[in-house]
Image (cartoon, helix red, strand yellow):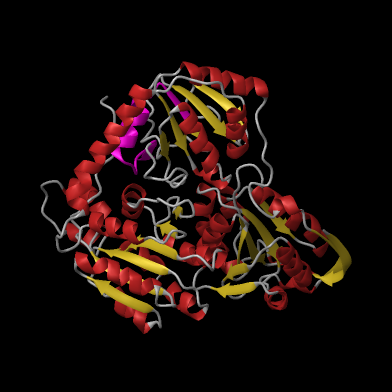
Amino acid sequence: MTHISTRSGASFIAETLKGYGVTHVFHVEAILRRTLVEMESLGVRRVATHSEKAAAYMADGYARVCHRPGVCMAQSVGAANLAAGLQDAYLGLAPVIALTGRKPPLAQYRNAYQEILHGPMFDPVTKYNVDLDAVEQLPYLLRQAFREATSGAPGPVHLDVTGHLGEELEIAEGNLQIIVEESFTRYPSICPEPGAEEVRHVLSVLEKSERPVIVAGGGARASSAGPEIVELAETLSIPVATSLNGKGIILEDHPLSMGVVGSYSRWCANRVVSEADVVIFIGSHTGDQVTNNWTVPRPGAQVIQIDIDPLELGRNYRNTIGLIGDAKATVHKLLASLHPKTSNGPWVHRTQGLVKEWRGELEPLLNSDAIPIRPERLCKELTELLPSDVVLVSDTGHSAIWTGTLVYLTHLEQRYIRAAGSLGWAFPASLGAKCAAPDRPVICFTGDGGFWYHLSELETARRCDIKTVTIVNNNHGFGQCSVGIDRAYGDRAGKREEMYQFRQVNFAKIAREMGCFGIRVEYPGDIVGAIHKALESDMPAVVEVVTDIRCLAPPPWTPPS
């Protein structure tokens, strides 16, 4: 789509974003005011937030759910906060476009009020980081921002616009050509596939393997490769584990599903990957979390890695056969070239036995009537009432461990996204997710430690009518940190609780005071009813569940050294 005429920078930015399918922009006042005015007439929703990090997290959640770039903006003094908020999008490979204002060149390097150099802050958390100084640059740099954000491994980009509020660029006019490249309105924008020779080599390795396992990651989820991966697994009788980002690629009641592997994991999944003779990573960076600090798979196991980024192939395992390509396209090509193979019956029986053993161990905790409530019971009740088309958004830390391992996704339309490392991400991200999927229920799972970060965005949710349900696993502290703090103290006397315990606060009352639905749960039998009421409340809702800070997630299984 191409359209050229004389227009202002504000009009060009607004029309271009609209053309690329952007429906919401998340921002902190004051930035690109004329552009935001233009957006209103085009039907693009402006969501004013209470912090720049929250704006970035909302854009991140939006992008991950609708597979389109999310847009966030901040004025010059807020640029550092916005950059900090892009860390999670960068680690989570989410296409977020960030725009910031910057004082004009004459003010640079002269102690201008509220001004520091922005470029160095955005370099580590973006794929593309440029200064936008003249209106004539807009058709090139804004278009390139969408190309960079959505191509290859997706990620954040940053445009630093001249003018403290971007006003200089907005009022300037020029013969500006709007070009919307349809393939870059979504991600993955381009889906390469490997050559036939490489595919044949991988299949020959799989045909000889006796204990293969698939580890499916966020890249597989991003390319919607779930059906192909399940077909490959069923055809060759291969168990499937996932990273946290890949959770839901295979339904968790499928007989070949092993669960989440790594450091935030089920021990049965770690055991299976450790015992495998061939490990097939599909769209998964082989970082420390998915491999439990590179202890699973075991040294010497054959690794096959499918990734759209050639630099990732063999990054952490020298014994790697690499296939460069989009996960969906590559697995589809593998399926097209498969030869019949004898079933891995003994191996599948072994892996299913480990999963059964893991589930049996948990049964008493899942059904516990203990007060304060055990998180395992909360996860069990949540699993049983999850809507079939829910988007479940999880914070990091214990929230990621509890939801990743104990909340089961058993419907194809259910979706799970989680923080890539930034505590407090989940609540704002869930608001962005709801903006991306207004007709689907969105449930956020966070702890009180995570919820405190951006509690103010409850006001944003109410003002903008963003109807999410937030479950606060409230144990009045950083429960995950207590073990490390106790270890640091050892036998030494002292006020160790000062380092991880908070005052007891009623979040349900706070939610109601801010005009939202709020309900507090202190007994296990009340969990289901409370969440049902929240889902039916037709307003932003908080379900506060009082849990036991002494209940810690189990440490990950690690092979004997």
**How many numbered marks, from 0 up?**
0
Q: Is residue 277 above or below residue 520?
A: above
- The percent coordinates of residue 382 (x first, y second) are 32, 60
Front position in the image: 248 or 23: 248
Q: Which residue corresponds to the image point at 38% horizontal and 60% vertical from the top-left? A: 386
Front position in the image: 535 or 342: 342
Apparent side of residue 91 relative to residue 143 in the rendered image (left or right): left
Front position in the image: 103 or 506: 506
Instruction: Quadrant for the N terminus, please.
Output: bottom right
Q: Is residue 552 above or below residue 217?
A: below
- The percent coordinates of residue 130 (x first, y second) are 69, 54
Apparent side of residue 329 relative to residue 135 in the rendered image (left or right): left
**Magenta stretch: residue 161 in it?**
no
Q: Which residues are magenta?
A: 256-280
- The percent coordinates of residue 148 (x first, y second) are 68, 48
Instruction: Quadrant for the C terminus, please.
Output: top left
- Answer yes or no: is residue 91 visible: yes
**Magenta stretch: residue 268 in it?**
yes
Apparent side of residue 61 relative to residue 455 in the rendered image (left or right): right
Q: Quadrant of residue 10?
A: bottom right
Q: Which residue corresponds to the image point at 61% horizontal and 74% vertical from the top-left? A: 46
- The percent coordinates of residue 150 (x first, y second) are 65, 49
Q: Is residue 406 above or below residue 32?
A: above
Apparent side of residue 468 relative to residue 406 in the rendered image (left or right): right
Q: Quadrant of residue 457?
A: bottom left
